[in-house]
Amino acid sequence: MPRPCKKRKITARPRAYYFKPRAVPLCELEETVLGLDELQALEHADLARKDQRAAAAAMKVSRQTFGNILASARRKLADAVVNGKALKIEGGPEELARPHCGGEHK
């Protein structure tokens, strides 16, 4: 029996949840689903240029798990771009990290 998935820390929700090829109706496209944890991994690794150790710590997962999430995200992104599929961003075992406000609640 596989271990249950731990929730991964994400810092924000995406501004857009769908990307698709131009001039093709969505109903005519195959869809690839990218999880919110996979999107967060792409952001840490490819935009913020964090190494896997720092990115894994930020997401509260092991380096191995981070590497697996990142590899899956890159595969799905490549599939959508190369094969002209719609990319839908949704769900996954994630937990939205709340920023620390600095003040104490009374």
Image: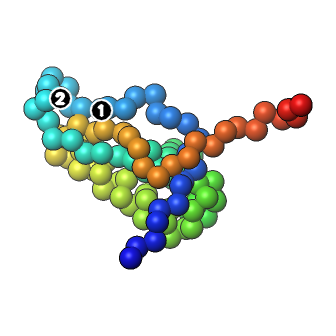
User: In whole angstroms, how far apart are the C-alphas of marks 2 and 1?
Assistant: 10 Å
Q: Viewer-proximal residue, 60 or 82?
A: 60
Q: Quadrant of residue 25?
A: top left
**Measured from the top left, where is residue 55 in percent x and y?**
58, 56
Would you call the spot at circle 1 few (<14 residues within 10 Å), some (14-19), or many (20 or more)? some
Residue, x 35% and y 46% (percent of image)?
34
**Rendering coords of residue 38 (x, y %):** 43, 50
Q: Is residue 85 found left or right of 17 in the rendered image?
A: left
Image height check: is 86 above or below 3? above
As drawn, is 15 to the left or to the right of 96?
A: left
Q: Secondary structure at mark 1?
A: strand
Residue sitting at the far bottom: 1
Query: Measured from the top left, where is residue 88 in percent x and y?
Result: 31, 38
Q: Earlier in the sequence, mark 2 or mark 1?
A: 1
Q: Residues within 10 Å of mark 2 (few under 14, many from 20)?
A: some
Q: Is residue 50 above or below residue 64?
A: above
Q: Amino acid at mark 1?
A: Phe
Residue 37 spot, x, y in % from top left: 47, 50
In the rendered image, the quadrant that contains the C terminus is top right
Relative side of 97 to 33, left or right: right
Residue tagged 1: 19
Front residue of 77 and 101 = 101
Q: Nearer the viewer, residue 49 or 92?
A: 92
The residue pinned by badge 2 equals 26
User: Residue drawn 57% across and 62% down?
Assistant: 61
Q: Do tag 2 and tag 1 residues touch (Cβ < 8 Å)? A: no
